[in-house]
């Protein structure tokens, strides 16, 4: 069953600051104007496509694919209002460095990082077949890095929940 897609409202409100349209990452806080934990309705002045969560899946969330800033936002599963994850596939800039397409080894060296966790996950690919990704968690930074063929393909900015 296809998910319903709706377009966000178009308002006259706009910004002259083009830097806000770049997906600039601030770990544990934001990507561009989008702040983790903020109410998604604060960003409805931007154009977006909306996909509601699929109630048949064990975990799914409402999704907002923004047009001007190349990010997809997932909200919390319970209320559907709070920004829980910001996904960057096309561009993600951290400390002036573009992460998408960067070799993963270079990322580790440049930022002096070591992953907290590593998984190999299968996911649907951009074409007919899916692919296996190496997925690295950097919990202190609130980052999940998806790597394919040794290059960063997706960056997720999120809030990690502490084990209770």
Image: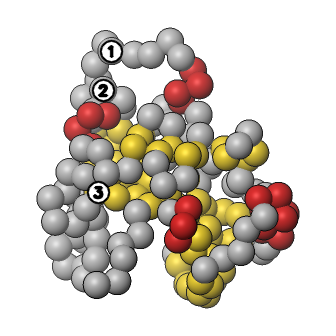
Q: Residue at x 59, y 25 (%)?
A: 19
Label 1 element class? loop
> Mark 3 or 2 closer to N-term?
2
- In the displayed structure, 7 sits above or below 14; it is below
Question: What residue do we see at 70% from left, 54% from top?
Answer: 100
Looking at the rendering, in which quadrant would you find the N terminus? bottom left
Q: Residue at x 23, y 38 (%)?
A: 41
Q: Is residue 75 above or below residue 117?
A: above
Q: CA distance from mark 3 to mark 1?
A: 23 Å
The structure residue drawn at horizontal position 56% and vertical position 62%, both measured from the top left corner, is 141
| Residue corresponding to mark 3 | 75
Q: Which residue is mark 1?
A: 13
Secondary structure, mark 3, is: strand
Residue 159 in the image, given as x and y percentages of width and height: 40, 63
Ranked by sequence position, the earlier of labels 3 and 1 is: 1
| C-alpha distance separating marks 3 and 2 | 17 Å
Q: Secondary structure at mark 2?
A: loop
Q: Are marks 3 and 1 in contact (CB under 8 Å)?
A: no
């Amino acid at each position: 069953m296809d998910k319903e897609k709706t377009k966000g409202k178009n308002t006259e409100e706009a910004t002259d600051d083009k830097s806000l349209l770049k997906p600039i990452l601030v770990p544990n806080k934001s990507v561009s104007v989008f702040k983790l934990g903020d109410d998604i309705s604060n960003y409805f002045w931007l154009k977006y496509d909306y996909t509601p969560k699929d109630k048949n899946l064990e975990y799914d969330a409402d999704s907002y694919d923004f047009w001007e800033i190349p990010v997809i936002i997932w909200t919390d599963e319970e209320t559907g209002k709070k920004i829980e994850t910001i996904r960057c596939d096309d561009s993600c800039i951290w400390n002036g460095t573009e992460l998408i397409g960067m070799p993963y080894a270079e990322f580790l060296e440049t930022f002096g990082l070591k992953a907290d966790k590593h998984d190999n996950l299968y996911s649907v690919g951009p074409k007919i077949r899916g692919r296996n990704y190496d997925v690295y968690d950097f919990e202190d930074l609130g980052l999940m890095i998806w790597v394919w063929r040794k290059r960063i393909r997706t960056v997720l900015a999120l809030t990690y929940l502490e084990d209770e």
